[in-house]
Image (cartoon, grey):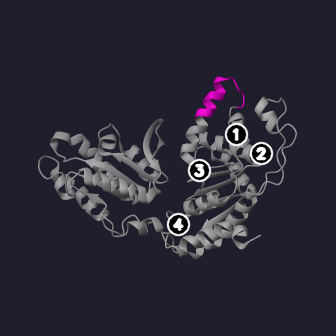
Amino acid sequence: MTNAAARPVTAAYEARIADGRLIGDPAQRAVLPALDGLAVAMSAPPPAERSGGLIGRLFGAASSPAPQAGAPRGIYLWGGVGRGKSMLMDLMMDTARTGAKRRVHFHAFMQEVHAGLNAARARGDQDAVRPVAEAIAARTRLFCFDEMQITDIADAMIVGRLFQVLFDRGVSVVTTSNRPPEDLYKDGLNRALFLPFIDLIRERMQVLRLGSERDYRQDRMQGGQVWFSPDDAAARRALDGIWDELTGGAEPAPRVLAVGGRQLGIPAAGRVGRSSFADLCGQPLGPADYLAIADAFDTLILDAIPRLGPQNHDQARRFVTLIDALYEARVRLIASAADAPEQLYATGRGSFEFERTASRLQEMRDAGWGTVPAG
């Protein structure tokens, strides 16, 4: 076996360094052997299907399929924001020579799972999770989830059950997260019910910390413009370009945030969200909504902030609350607006109170704003 074949992820990583697309990082190199091992294992022929396995799943055999033995352990890669977790997972995904692989953002995947659960319940299935997981396992050997984050007890219970079935059917799972397994669903309601899933992760996945000291996503933004005025076609093109730079050109998918029994949808890719001023401040949202947004994202791209004044005082008040939440959480704001921050609310009732918000917006334009240290 050639060196490139034995170390496919490492070879791809070094090639990117050679052509200038990456800067070598010791912490990233430290996790490459584990990714190499899984990529090589995925490139080998799959184990023979046991009796009652795939055929049973496809044609509804009464007995449950027997678990597959010998499936490679998955990988749980965690670390601070912007350390290269998604990039490394994508390299492993690209170099694994199997057609039965899929890469999806975790929140987008959960939306698919909920749709599958609803369909199973409509058919009268008593165990709605199993057919959803079996359908995935029937066509997938390698499943890559980006940005695992559990915030809801229903999702916590679904994920644990679903992963158990995937593991039992020989699916290797790779996931990235900003948190170690022990901190998933931290302080959540009935968290004790979730703890067996953490044990399952430790048993069936290699848990690797990516401890790089550099935040490469913030590096890309250092010194870059983050406030664009006036809000014209050029500003919109600039925001589109920044979105592509931060997300790798990903299509935004709805991120559904649970807020006090309600659901708030924000287009997102990873921990980068994008919305318009009208959607966030023109609707009857409150502090809880904005705190949820600040908790869910490291960067928020906000389009089309208008001039503010007594004529749209309610929208201005919501904008002030939004900025306060982003500021306290050190979320990076990238925006297009009708004018500079100090000129957005220049005259009329409420302009004096807006001066604090304008000052915060100026501070948030600094190149170092929003940098998150390695965890």
Whichever of callouts 4 and 1 sits on the residue coming sooner in the sequence is 4
- The residue most toward the front is 2
Q: Few, some or many C-alpha atoms within 10 Å of disc 1 (few <14, some 14-19, many ≥20)?
A: many
Q: Which residue is mark 1?
A: 133
Side of 101 relative to 301 (left or right): right
- Name the residue located 55 percent from the left edge and 75 percent from the top edge: 25
Task: Answer left or right for 110 relative to 349.
Answer: right
* Residue placed most toward the observer, 88 or 334: 88
Mark 3, residue position:
185
* Dot 3 amino acid type: Tyr
Label 2, label 1: how many angstroms apart (C-alpha)? 9 Å
**Element under label 4?**
loop
Q: CA distance from mark 3 to mark 4?
A: 22 Å
The picture places residue 206, in percent across and down from the top left corner, at 71, 61
Q: Where, quadrant-wise, is the N terminus in this rendering?
A: bottom right
Residue at 74% over, 71% down: 2
Q: Does dot 3 land on a helix, a strand or a loop?
A: loop
- Asked which secondary structure carries label 2, the reply is loop
Residue 306: percent from left, percent from top:
22, 47
Instruction: Classify the position of the C terminus by image quarter.
Output: bottom right
Please name the residue that numbered disc 2 is placed on. 169
User: Tag 3: Cα neighbours inside 10 Å, few (<14), some, or many (≥20)?
Assistant: many
Give, as a three-letter code, the residue at label 1. Answer: Ala
Residue 237 place in picture, x, y as percent = 31, 53
| The disc label shown at residue 213, or none | none
Label 3, label 1: how many angstroms apart (C-alpha)? Answer: 21 Å
Instruction: Give the residue number, with chain letter if any, for mark 4.
Output: 83
Kindly identify the amino acid type of the residue bearing the numbered disc 4.
Arg
Q: Nearer the viewer, mark 3 or mark 4?
A: 4
